[in-house]
Image (cartoon, grey):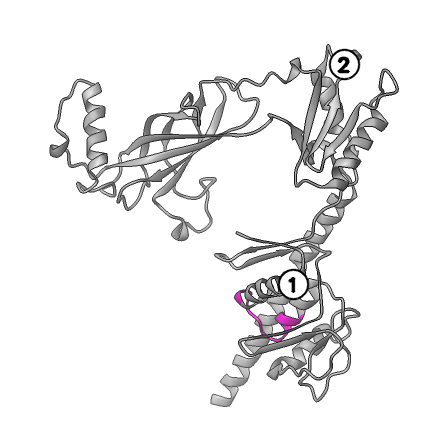
Amino acid sequence: MALELDILNQEGQIMKKIIFTTIFLLLFAGFSALAQQEEATVRIGDIANLSGERDNHLIGYGLVVGLDGTGDSARSQGTMQSIANMLKTFGVDVPSERVTARNAAAVTVTATLPPFTYPGDTIDVTVSSLGDARSLESGVLLMTPLRAGNEEVYAVAQGPVSTGGKDGNSLNRRTDPENVGHIPNGGLVEGEVDFNWREEESLTLQVRGGSFANASRIAAAINEHVPSEDETEVASAVDPGKVEVRIPQYASEDVVDFVATIKSLEVEVEMPTRVVINERTGTVVIGRNVRISTVAIAHRGLKVQVGPDPEVEVDTGDDNEVFSSLFGDHPDAVDDAYEEETVMLMESGPTILDLVEALNAIGAEADDIIAILQAMKRAGALHAILEIM
């Protein structure tokens, strides 16, 4: 009976690894297809914006009321003083030391004001506890002015607070922090950010990511499709992050249409290779063209060699059969010759996907892969931009 349970347990572990590897490959295949589409052609408006066309951060201090005894305690003197000050504006004079309301909490309210937003528009706001409130669930934010860095009020926030996730519909409410909430469309815009871009004789396009190649290609695409009144080109790349566009005389009366035409032009762009890691969730997203150099890896008993040296042995344990069945014939990933079924070699010049496939096959968990990728980047063997969230 014990032997049967042990066999079942081993089969379960093998199936688990096969499923994990399959899911990873499916996700990577989808990401690769998306990368191929993005690398083919993109609109200029997707990779560049007008100088001055930017978001503005807003912040405010407010009170959330209506909590079910989960608000700030009497130790949060700032909250009690805020309640007393609010009551005083309504003609109720109560000393702050006599206020004990566990159904209220002091919060900071933050929001982002997008460009070309005008009075009457609404924006989403985020509410975060300042005191020792246990939860903001079912609370209501009272009217809170939201100010920018220049201390001017650009919006006013108010409404019921949702703690179910960023969109109010979290799939796992147990893991969502209940002292942070969101109010979709809870901010009413009251002020307009001045942006007199139509009064200029030229426009500046800011290229996201700052690439020499992309800036040059954007300028070339504009000059190819936008006619000039003289022999002077309309657009010129100033540096990797800027493209200057002169507004022709014929377009000065309709600059909006001119900008729309420019932003709708398509160009082939150079996309950087990236590896994005979320250590909190164990998520790894890898670009399709990420490459690695010759390297030997040892981590928690897992050993892998990338390169031509056959002397480094790797013990794959009982998972070698699974590894062979899944990746034994992979043209780029694995050397077909296994020495006594204990050596796992990868050919020189593989992609990072080849390495992750191999690590999955010998039982590496998500945190193992993350640790290995970080160490490879520090060793100079990972040729990509490593972003850690």
Quarter of the rendering containing residue 381: bottom right
Badge 1, how many Cα within 10 Å: few under 14, some, many 20+? few
Q: Secondary structure at mark 1?
A: loop
How far is disc 1 from disc 2 in space, using C-alphas?
A: 50 Å
Find the magenta span and give its range: 358-367
Q: Is residue 252 above or below residue 65?
A: above
Q: Nearer the viewer, residue 77 or 210?
A: 210
Q: Is residue 83 above or below residue 250?
A: below
Identify residue type, mark 2.
Ala
Relative to 279, 234 lies left or right: right
Identify residue type, mark 1.
Gly
**Circle on res. 251:** 2
What is the residue that sits farthest to the right in this orientation? 231
Residue 213 placement (x, y as % from top left):
77, 41
Residue 363 located within the stretch drawn in magenta: yes
Q: Nearer the viewer, residue 34 or 233?
A: 233
Q: Are marks 1 and 2 in contact (CB under 8 Å)?
A: no
Residue at the spot x=23%, y=24% of the render?
86
Relative to 52, 48 lies left or right: right
Residue at the spot x=74%, y=36% of the render?
215
Q: State the predominant SS element of the stretch in magenta.
A: helix
Q: Secondary structure at mark 2?
A: helix
Residue at which label 1 appears: 380
